[in-house]
Amino acid sequence: MAVIQDVHGHGHDHPTGIMRWLTTTNHKDIGTLYLCFSLVMLFVGGFLAMGIRAELFMPGIQILEPEVFNSFTTLHGLIMVFGAVMPAWVGFANWQVPLMIGAPDMAFARLNNWSFWLLPVAALLLITSFFVPGGAAAGGWTFYPPLSTQGGMGTDMMLFAVHILGMSSIMGSINIITTILNMRAPGMTLMKMPMFVWTWLITAYLLVLVMPVLAGAVTMVLTDRNFGTSFFNAAGGGDPVMFQHIFWFFGHPEVYIMILPAFGVVSEIIPTFSRKPLFGYSSMVYATASIALLSCFVWAHHMFTAGMPVAGQLFFMYATMLIAVPTGVKVFNWTATMWRGSMTFEVPMLFSIGFIFLFVIGGFSGVVCAIVPVDIQVQDTYYVIAHFHYVLVSGALFALFAGAYYWLPKWTGHMYDESLGKWHFWLSMVFFNVAFFVQHFLGLAGMPRRIPDYALQFADFNMISSIGAFGFGLTQLLFVYIVIKCVRGGEKAADKTWEGATTLEWTHLPSPAPYHSFETPPVVK
Amino acid sequence: MKQDVAKTNVDILKKLLVFSVVMFGFGYALVPLYKKFCEVTGIYELERPDTLTKHTEVDNTRSISLLLDANVRGLPWKFKSLQANIHLHPGKLTEVMYEISNESEEVQVGQAIPSYSPKNLERYLKKIECFCFSQQELQGKEVKQLPVRFLIDPEIPGDIHTATISYTFFNVKN
């Protein structure tokens, strides 16, 4: 096993060009690969979103045939969840976890390389599935049977891709858990770890807990399709509703897998720009852990209309509402950290405050959806679409932007363009709300999701929403420009770029962080 | 990296791998667990006859129009109800006949799955006998007439005047 942990052996004569990236075992290189991959996938998923919004710009069928529209919504969801948000967080973990705990690299460097290079394979399967006979999977990103046990070859490719992505996530999380548990600098006890490291430790545990269950469900769908089993086939004694239970047993923790690292990033940035330590650090840790724990007992709130005894509905309703308590603790702590701090509003801070503001709106609409009688009304309407885009776009994605701006100076050694960054924030903020706020109204008025056409009374709000979505999509090109500009040059970043920062990568390392860092671990007092 | 760190890393890796495999197994274990849970709580009773525990009074003041629908999926069978619709009083034990015929020459096995409308009809529909409680085997060209004996609980809400019972025969692969 010494071979796979060879992080020092290859010294500084690493290969150049494409081979450097194919064979790299360096956590910074792999982090960069993850982040670039997820940025590309963000634009692939974004392209699909633009297609959806273009079709919904006006009533009637203009651009996409209904079947293609269904493929667009399905693949948009899958690519954004598994291709953009999750790999982006793993990229952050790869870059930041070793730097923040004072470790030389990730625990299993070659495993790390492998878990990244599985991703492009899966992405290729997903994208090429559009061009096979029968088209891409069209049964929704949740691939419920019987739709997912029908469908053509594109569905098999999608299921196989989900398998690969799941495997990559499991390996990535095993690596992260091991690194955090076993490779912290001397003196860094668990309760001295930065919040970002804490949230990722808990996220990684959630991943190894639920990803294999998803793998089981995917395997069952594949054998139902290809080998004549009847797990979800009613005629053969199976039960399609059982799929929903298994899927959401994975699916609900999955949404926290996407948001907990966001909590971590925001918990790093708010104290830095408030120039105060994080308020209630230990309550933050316990709140994160209890959110993760509770998330395993609320899955059936996604299926209140699927048929369930009232006792079950009540249990899942109250359990879901209970999650608002630890989440409220977090929001309180962030606000209390800012209270009477000497705040400045650089781009990372703007995105973090935007995150808190909009995530709370998404959280509140989540509590609304948790109420069974309301949920039965809004199930599968645009209200739900609005809810989860508030927590995933203005939640996870805004936190990703915040983190990227926060650490870009450390990664590249250059300052990003502050005024362009502010443009990026304000345009994103405005267009995001234009795109998604009106969807609450559409949902409450009864517009169903996943349908390419709609009744005339929904026309105005849909047009507004589409304009917002186009604006939001275009704004993200600005982000790419800012990142490229920052990588290529710019004002030299100070080693401790942000005066309020306290974590090891700012206090102990130069900017840019050297290719090999913390070969001798720092001592944390 | 120090050797003892490397060793502990591998130990943690092994534990987490075992845990992942166990969770993969847990995904599969959910299948029998789900079946058992539904059985114990009585949620999933499609294949079990209802028992009449109390004597039910026939409510002659009300009449419900019942549509009897029959479908076949994936079998060369013909399946129909001998009465397209009936009127009945809640509480009255009723028998309806269905007919299935195998159009092919081969022996085939099918399973009927019921579906009700309105959604909560299931709660008030008490089936004492039904061909859907077991798989049906038909020889080539065989024709069978099968009964369903049931009653509708008089406690059914007063605003239900029409209801539908639909059966679909599915091909059971051997």
Image: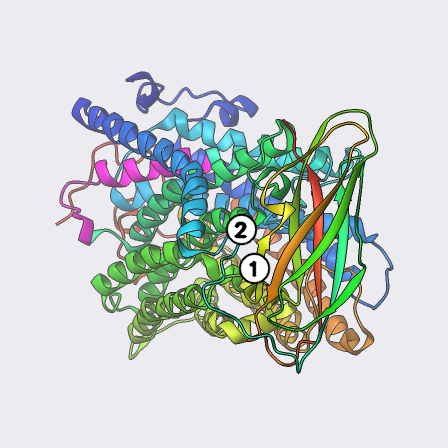
Q: In which quarter of the image is the N terminus of chain A?
A: top left
CA gap, disc 2 and disc 1: 9 Å
| Callout 1: chain | A
Q: Is mark 1 on a helix, strand or loop?
A: helix
A525 left or right of A176 in image: left
Q: Quadrant of residue B127?
A: bottom right
Picture colour scheme = rainbow
**Which residue is found at the position 26% from the left and 65% from the top?**
A278
Q: In this view, does A345 lie above or below B28?
A: below
Q: Give the secondary structure at mark 2.
A: helix
Write down the residue under mark 2.
A244
Residue B167, magenta (yes or no) = no
Residue A292 appears in which quarter of the rendering? bottom left
For discs 2 and 1, the disc positioned in front in the rendered view: 1
Residue A285 vs residue B87, the one in the foreground? B87
Q: Which mark is residue A306?
A: 1
- The reply, left or right, for residue A167 in relation to residue A446 is left
At a point 37% along the width and 57% down the height, the residue shown is A297
User: Residue A154, image x and y in percent?
Assistant: 71, 36
Identify the chain of the residue marked 2, using the numbered disc in the image. A
Q: Earlier in the sequence, mark 2 or mark 1?
A: 2
Residue neighbourhood size for the residue with mark 2, other residues' Cα within 10 Å, grouped as few (<14), some (14–19), many (≥20): many
Amino acid at dot 1:
Ala
Q: Position of residue B13 (x, y in %)?
A: 29, 29
Say if residue A489 shows up in the picture. no
